[in-house]
Image (spheres, helix red, strand yellow):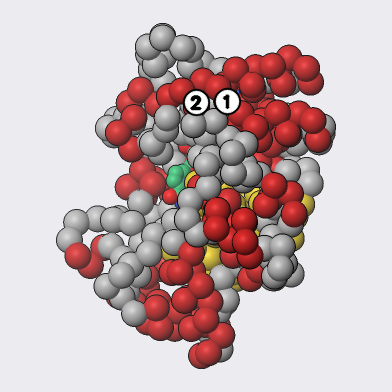
Amino acid sequence: MEYRKLGASGMFVPALTLGTATFYPPEMNDRTGTTDAAQSRRIIDVCLDHGLTMFDSATSYGRGHSELFLGEAIKGRRDKVIISTKAGMPSGEGPMRIGLSRQNLTTAIETSLTRLHTDYIDVFQLHCFDSLTPVEETLSTLDDFVRQGKIRYVGVSNFAGWQLMKSLAVAERHNLPRYVIQQVYYSLIGRDFELDLMPLGVDQGVSAAIWSPLGWGRLTGKLRRGQPVPEGSRLLKTQADAPPIDPERLFKVIDCLERVAAQVGKSIPQVALNWLLQRPTVATVIIGARNEKQLLDNLGAVGWSLSREQVAMLDAASTVYPLYPQWHQRRYTLDRNPSPVPTDVRDWFPQAGQDTY
Ligand SMILES: NC(=O)c1ccc[n+]([C@@H]2O[C@H](COP(=O)([O-])OP(=O)(O)OC[C@H]3O[C@@H](n4cnc5c(N)ncnc54)[C@H](OP(=O)(O)O)[C@@H]3O)[C@@H](O)[C@H]2O)c1
């Protein structure tokens, strides 16, 4: 397994992480395709056999069962795994179990440590921004946990660019922990990340961990034009929570993925994941697998690379028309005032008149 440096830190993480959002008992409401304790353990064993050592959870996943199953499965081999977990999304009833206050974060982190049977979390992320809690309060709470050795690296998830940049500035001003990772939604059918958060990551040394890399299970080869969403799939049960898409664009991307997959002799998920692994700032792609077969397929996304031409085909099929001020900066500013964003990132945005209307 390839390892990649985590932002402006000395930490290295595997190019693939296993997402554990589906780890919970089947008797609970089956919204995301449950993976029970025994299957979770088996999946974690297979990951470790293949050098995938990083596991992503959250206090909210499976109402705590994701961390519980993960904690059970790694007992006796804590030193072989990298634990990533998150807090801030609702993890219980009432206003005390949500957000980034000292109150909620302290409870959440201590609870995670207990569930995971560990005395430290390798990578701790804020699951979402909390506009009601001062950034200083959140950062000073994280600072206390870092100083106690209970958290090693910190990051965010689902922050807007200004929220992340403000947090980095406050951290610098008060000598508080600096975020080195942002967990973001990014896929061939969701490239908004490229507009602001990716350039910020390049400039500030914040790596990306990619969530829902197959677009919430849409880039798997199972979706067909004019056909119903497959029975029993996670997507069917959770469409209301899935990232929004333009169906026309989705099938343009799927058609292109099929062509590229046939050229390279790989599966559609493998091609979609490999494309992500080639994007700037991406340190790790968080794969979701309902079972061992899917996991083994997704593990085949590493160890090879799409050619420049194949990447260009996928870029073209998935291009997003740039928003303001990106189109303005691209047209008038970047050439005079070179951006830290690599040239090829700028090239992803179509030139005026080049795109279709
Ligand atoms: N930070 C956040 O806010 C956030 C949000 C969401 C997720 N996450 C993290 O990201 C992880 C992954 O998210 P995700 O599960 O939505 O990822 P995804 O890769 O977009 O979708 C995974 C789903 O696609 C299907 N699938 C996966 N591999 C396949 C294969 N090789 N062949 C056929 N079908 C395949 C499975 O569903 P079916 O078999 O049912 O089709 C699987 O559950 C989560 O576990 C969590 O750790 C974080």
| Viewer-nearest residue: 5 or 253 | 253
Residue at point 39%, 60% (across, down): 128
Residue lying furthest bottom in this view? 174
Residue 51 position, x and y percent, is: 74, 42
Question: Hey, what amino acid is under mark 2?
Answer: Leu
Task: Pick whichever, 200 or 264, lies toward us.
Answer: 200
Image vertical order of residue 324 relative to residue 65, above or below:
below
Left or right of 115, for residue 17: right
For label 2, the residue is 250
When asked about the image quadrant of residue 111, the answer is bottom left
Relative placement, left or right, of 249 versus 198 is left
Q: Residue at x 71, y 19 (%)?
A: 261
The three-letter code of the residue at mark 1 reads: Val
Q: Nearer the viewer, residue 343 or 295?
A: 343
User: Is there any visible trace of residue 293 in the rendered image?
Assistant: no
- On the image, the x and y values in percent for residue 244 come to 38, 36
Q: Is residue 16 left or right of residue 88?
A: right
Question: Which quadrant of the view contains residue 236?
Answer: top left
* Tag 2 near tag 1, CB within 8 Å: yes
Residue under circle 1? Answer: 253
Secondary structure at badge 1 equals helix
Up the image or down, 96 lies above or below 1; here it is below
Residue 169 visible (yes or no): yes
Of residues 7 and 85, which is closer to you in this image? 7
- Location of residue 8 in the rendering, given as x and y in whole percent from the top left corner: 69, 70
Give the CA separation, mark 2 to mark 1: 5 Å
Q: Residue at x 36, y 43 (%)?
A: 62
- The picture places residue 94, in percent across and down from the top left corner, at 17, 61
Seen in the picture, residue 249 relative to 143 is either above or below; the reply is: above
